[in-house]
Amino acid sequence: MKIVALVGSNRSDSYNKKLALFMKERYQAKLSIELVPIDQLPIYNQDDELNPPDIVKLVKAQIADSDGVLMLTPEYNHSISAVLKNALDWCSRVEQVLVNKPTMVAGASMGLHGTVRAQMHLRDILNSPGVSALVLPGNEIFVGVVHEKIDEAGQLIDQPTIEFIDQVVDRFIKWIHTVKK
Ligand code: FNR
């Protein structure tokens, strides 16, 4: 099954990117996870939406061609980052590539709450008319205090978190089959 990962951080050392790469490796027998370069998208401009730059076409084509989307969000000022919101805005217009797309949400931050507030906003946005993704209900992956759970090599080392993500990924696979029927 082809899954695209949208990572909402453009930081080179991003924990959310490390989490995405960890998941790509760990679940490779079940899923083919590819990171989509949403950090390279220009700022959304309605003037350009009918004839967007090539990178916009590429990102939207990768999403359209996938069986599902994994979104990993940091928390910026109690919400999602501009990088992720920008990608969602591009995807919500003209070819609305997220409509009815099975989607799972996760997020990592150094704070205790592990992106709870960002994910609440994200789930709202994913329910907007132009986005309308089919978000896996519940299954909230909040990786708080992430700097103590991901090691120098970028490996997630917190066993309860790993086991919980294992379960959510299995439920996401079932969700994809359920909503595809
Ligand atoms: C943050 N951070 C943060 N953390 C949090 O728990 N709640 C918040 O509201 C914010 N706000 C915030 C704003 C801005 C502009 C920055 C740069 C950071 C901390 C943030 O979650 C932390 O830096 C994460 O490590 C960011 O994710 P990546 O880049 O590691 O994936």
Image (tube, rainbow, N blue to C red):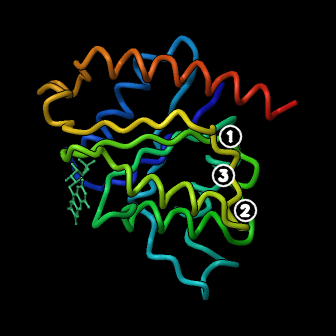
Residue 162 shown left or right of residue 5 in the figure: left
Q: Residue 8: which disc?
A: none
Tag nearer the camera, 1 or 3: 1
**Residue at disc 1, secondary structure:** strand
**Residue 141 location in percent, x, y?**
42, 35
| Residue at x 19% of width, y 38% of height | 145
Identify the image quadrant of the N terminus. Answer: top right
Work out how far the residue at label 3 is from the one at label 2, CA to CA, in angstroms.
11 Å
**Residue at disc 2, secondary structure:** loop
Query: What is the three-letter code of the residue carrying label 1?
Result: Pro
Q: Residue 61: which disc?
A: 3
Find out whether the residues at labels 2 and 1 contact each other: C-beta distance under 8 Å.
no
- Please state which of residues 4 and 123 is positioned toward the viewer in this rendering: 123
| Residue at x 65% of width, y 23% of height | 173
| Circle 1 residue | 102
Query: What is the three-letter code of the residue carrying label 3?
Result: Ala
Residue 107 shown left or right of residue 28 in the figure: left
Work out how far the residue at label 1 is from the one at label 3, CA to CA, in angstroms.
16 Å
Of pointers 1 and 3, the one earlier in the residue sequence = 3
Residue 99's place in the image compared with 82, above or below, is: above
Q: Quadrant of residue 175?
A: top right
| Residue at x 74% of width, y 64% of height | 95
Image quadrant of ligand 1? bottom left
Query: What is the three-letter code of the residue carrying label 2?
Result: Gln
Work out how far the residue at label 2 is from the one at label 1, CA to CA, in angstroms.
14 Å
| Residue at x 72% of width, y 62% of height | 96
| Circle 2 residue | 96
Identify the image quadrant of the C terminus. Answer: top right
Residue 88's place in the image compared with 16, above or below, is: below
Of pointers 2 and 1, the one earlier in the residue sequence = 2
